Image (tube, grey):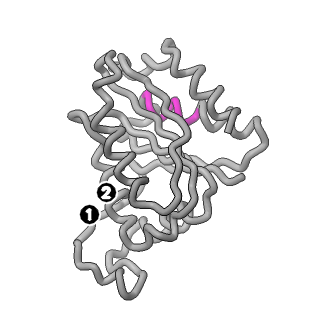
Amino acid sequence: MKVLIISSSPRKDGNSEVLCGRFAKGTSEAGHKVEILTLRDKRIAPCKACYACMESHTCVVKDDMEAIFPKLVEADTVVLASPVYFYSVSAQMKAMIDRCLVGHKSIAGKKFYFIVTAADPQHEAVEGTLSAFRGFIRCLPDAQEKGVIYGTGTWDKGDVYRHPSYEHAYEMGKEI
């Protein structure tokens, strides 16, 4: 099975990115092929809403989405990870999601896992982020949500190492 983990943390080795690594470790140990894609290293422009892609099936914007989108299509399982920024996904993740308009129907039949981290210790703090993720997969044919890893109460870089989500991410990765 091919697993694509997309980390949208703008902070290198931030809490959500650490959880991506733990998920990847479990997935790899379970015998699956895994790739972590870090959006902070990518140049992704916002969607222009020109809808040229509806006819050509190609986006007119030329940037790193040209390499990212085929990875989404090829993956069997996709993990979307974001820190909570003002009760929603990071700008990097939102730009990537919006640019999937070009061929969202070809991202069909995927299993999705979500990793969310937030300073607020309450699970309610991640509702907006999960709503954005769920809204995205609701637009994809036969997409299935398989699990959520909650890294709530993790503000400072490294807080997640002492959080139950650290082990949970590894275990969930092993179980896919």
Residue at (31%, 52%) from the top-left corner? Answer: 94
User: In the rendered image, which residue does mark 1 sit on?
Assistant: 46
- Magenta stretch: give its range: 15-21
In the displayed orientation, state which residue is furthest to the bottom: 55
Horizontal placement of 35 versus 60: left or right? right
- Please count the marks in the image: 2
Is 16 a magenta residue?
yes
Q: Classify residue 173 by image quadrant.
A: top right
Decide whether the magenta segment is chiefly helix, strand or loop. Answer: helix
Q: Quadrant of the C terminus?
A: top right
Horizontal placement of 7 versus 110: left or right? left
User: In the image, residue 22 lies at what x, y percent?
Assistant: 60, 30
User: In the image, residue 150 lies at what x, y percent?
Assistant: 44, 26
Secondary element under disc 2, as helix, strand or loop, is helix
Q: Measure the C-alpha gap from mark 1 to mark 2.
A: 5 Å
Q: Is residue 64 above or below residue 168?
A: below
User: In the image, residue 115 lies at what x, y percent?
Assistant: 46, 35
Residue at (53%, 35%) from the top-left corner? Answer: 147
Q: Are marks 1 and 2 in contact (CB under 8 Å)?
A: yes
Residue at (72%, 52%) from the top-left corner? Answer: 1
User: In the rendered image, which residue does mark 2 sit on?
Assistant: 95
Secondary element under disc 1, as helix, strand or loop, is loop
Amino acid bearing label 1: Pro
The residue carrying pointer 2 sits among few (fewer than 14), some (14 to 19) or many (20 or more) residues within 10 Å by Cα, namely: some
Q: Is residue 60 above or below residue 30?
A: below
Is 38 a magenta residue?
no
Q: Is residue 118 above or below residue 121?
A: below
Horizontal placement of 24 versus 118: left or right? right
Amino acid bearing label 2: Ala
In the displayed orientation, state which residue is furthest to the right: 31
Which mark, by number, is residue 19?
none
User: In the image, residue 171 lies at what x, y percent?
Assistant: 65, 26
